[in-house]
Image: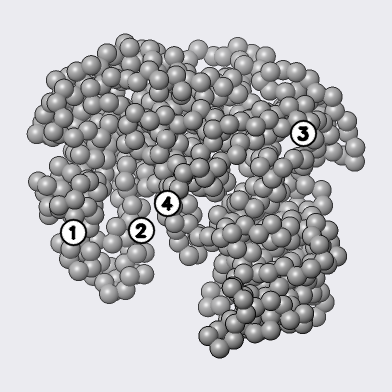
Amino acid sequence: MPTTRRTFLAGSAAAASLLQAQTGGAPAASVPPLSQMLPLRFRQVHLDFHTSEQIEGIGNEFDPEQFAATVEKARVNSITCFARCHHGMIYFDTKTNPERRHPHMKRNLLKEQIEACHKRNIRVPIYTTVQWDYYSSIHNPEWWVLDEKGQPTGTPINEAGFYRNLCVFSGYGEFLKAHVKDLFNDVPVDGLFFDIVQPRDCHCQVCRPAMLKAGVDSRDAEQRGRFAIERINQWKRETTAFVHAINKNVSVFYNAGHIGPRHRAVQSAYTHFELESLPSGGWGYLDFPLKQRYVRTLGIEAMGMTGKFHTSWGDFHSLKNPAALEFETSLMLALNAKCSIGDQLHPSGRIDRATYELIGEAYAKVEKKEPWCVDARPVSDVGVLTPEEFIGGAARTLPAASWGAVRMLTELRAQFDVLDSKSDFNGYRVLILPDRIPVDEALAAKLEAFVQKGGALLASFESGLDPKGERFMLPSLGVDLAGEAPFSPDFLVPRGTFGVDLPGTEFVMYLKGKLVKPRPGAIVEVDARVPYFNRTADHFCSHRHTPSSGKTGYPGIVGNGRNLYFMHPVFEQYHTNAPRWVKSLVAAALRRQLPDPVLRAEGPSTLMATLNEQPNRFIVHLLHYIPERRGQSLDVIEDIIPLHDVAVSVKPSRAVKRVVIAPEGAVLPHTVRDGRVLFTLPRLAGHQMIALEM
């Protein structure tokens, strides 16, 4: 049977020194030059400064020493500051584009920010916009992205907003290069954050000929989409090469609001990933875990990015609830990411004291926790293939099965990573194929090899079918396709191990499933019962759906050895309306496939638990925060509700000497039974780490 997966990330001398210094090892080495330091620090602020050209007094109240001192007091050690914003305004002494320098700015704002922060060893990556630039859209309309009808895309001319899309392959691309070079000539550059860099289906005077030359059928949206991705990826590679030809130590990141499987092909253009994911800004509380559980398998450092805002970017004079910010930064640490909190500087340049008291409260806790997070890697039993690879997805519009799988497995406290077809499956004990994972011959061979080595598959609905949806490609699942289920909704009656947590009655399955026929040797674990008839204009009963007729119709869950197939899209269903019985059925499947998981924690479904590993210890992260939909548009966290006597057991790969509450240092009594280390945390108030020292 495969051993539990441990994902190793590249370490760093600076990180190792920090770990040793703060955990009783050798003293930290002297701080290296800023350009040689690890690009990602644990406590970053992303300081927006999208400022209208019509506002006067830009930066007049900026005090460099007060700015840097306030940031430092908030325990921030990296802050992204602006070279150029979505309005197209420039905030340094540009020699190349003086006409774009903010007309009401009387100082070299960016340079002063950098110099003041560098004096305090605070890193300053630099922000510049790419595909949104209001000034360019007005003065250079020939740079606009045009749709297939030849019309400009983005904010209409008579509406407020700077969201007019610009084409980097037009003359605008040369402007961007000159702008970057100009930036290097004026200020020290630690890193570059290029914002709004997305594939654009552009039909401008440059892109359309390029499309035709490449043999792309301009009438085919799918071909155009692939072409757009290939072109923007090449642009990223060339831009990174351009930047590193000037200074190879500069970090580079391209932001598109989402990081996912399509970034694997262009990963070499990034020095790291920053996962923009403001839970209140439309991304939601599932978004960051979904992205980070994938990104952390790629061997590249990442940071989560939330915001101090009550809602999202540009929400001036609002503050997030402290409990929410504590949860968001704690979750980043638990999932092996560094932290970034978004803020927006007032046009006057005046830094807001209350904002940095809020950030400082969260970051003071992060700073104390860092030694248990440096170079920590996840320990995972389960790999979840992402439907995003096959059916697409972008920020806020990811496949429903992805959301459902992450929510359900988090509530079940499974230790899992999100994978794509190119991921290394070795080391995982179970692979989940949620609802819509098409399987070609190459992926089929890889999955069957995983099973042959002792792994187990859990697939649902269309997962395992060939890309045309005509036949199952995985003999290990033990099913053949017989068509569409003739009834919907239909009803499962759990029995045996699938009925342990459920009463022996019918449970409705709201979404239509696939009709399958078990192969010889496969077993129908749970039958589907059928209604009297489907609901139509001529046949209907009651308000919603027709009840069960009591007749068994076809297989609902099929087992083939340790492999299991669910006929329904259970993960999409859980995302839609979260039936507890659906989660119970999946939990029963995982108990069978994974009877001895690497981590168990007893508590309500709102308790989150992750397991990480450092060279000398395992670290359990326990989190208990409850997002609530108190307003119509977003979830909030206001109160921290403690849990008491949380029982935990871990199956470590090495002998454990002692169990310690971190960073507080209190030793917890523990016992060892059947290879598992058992202990109880007396009180959990928000986030707690527990170290199992070797």
Q: State the residue position of label 3.
A: 646
Mark nearest the camera among 3 and 4 is 3
Q: Residue at x 79, y 60 (%)?
A: 502
Count residues near mark 1 (Cα–Cα under 10 Å), then give few for <14, some for 14-19, many for 20+.
many
The N terminus is located in which quarter? bottom right
Callout 4: SS: loop
Q: Earlier in the sequence, mark 4 or mark 2?
A: 2
The C terminus is located in which quarter? top right
Please identify the quarter of the rendering in which residue 531 is found.
bottom right
Hey, which residue is sitting farthest front in the picture?
Answer: 542
Q: Nearer the viewer, residue 301 or 154?
A: 154
Is residue 625 depicted above or below 551 in this figure? above
The Cα atoms of the two marked residues, 4 and 1, are separated by 22 Å
Please identify the quarter of the rendering in which residue 448 is found.
bottom right
| Left or right: 447 in relation to 69 | right
Asked whether residue 420 is in view, the answer is: no
Which dot marks residue 152?
1
Q: Earlier in the sequence, mark 3 or mark 2?
A: 2
Callout 2: SS: helix
Asked whether residue 200 is in view, the answer is: yes
The Cα atoms of the two marked residues, 3 and 1, are separated by 57 Å
Please identify the quarter of the rendering in which residue 628 is found.
top right
Q: Amino acid at mark 1?
A: Pro
Q: Earlier in the sequence, mark 1 or mark 2?
A: 1
Q: Amino acid at mark 4?
A: Ala
Q: Residue at x 30, y 50 (%)?
A: 235
Which dot marks residue 229?
2
Place of residue 452 in the rendered image (x, y in percent of width and height, measured from the top left): 75, 63
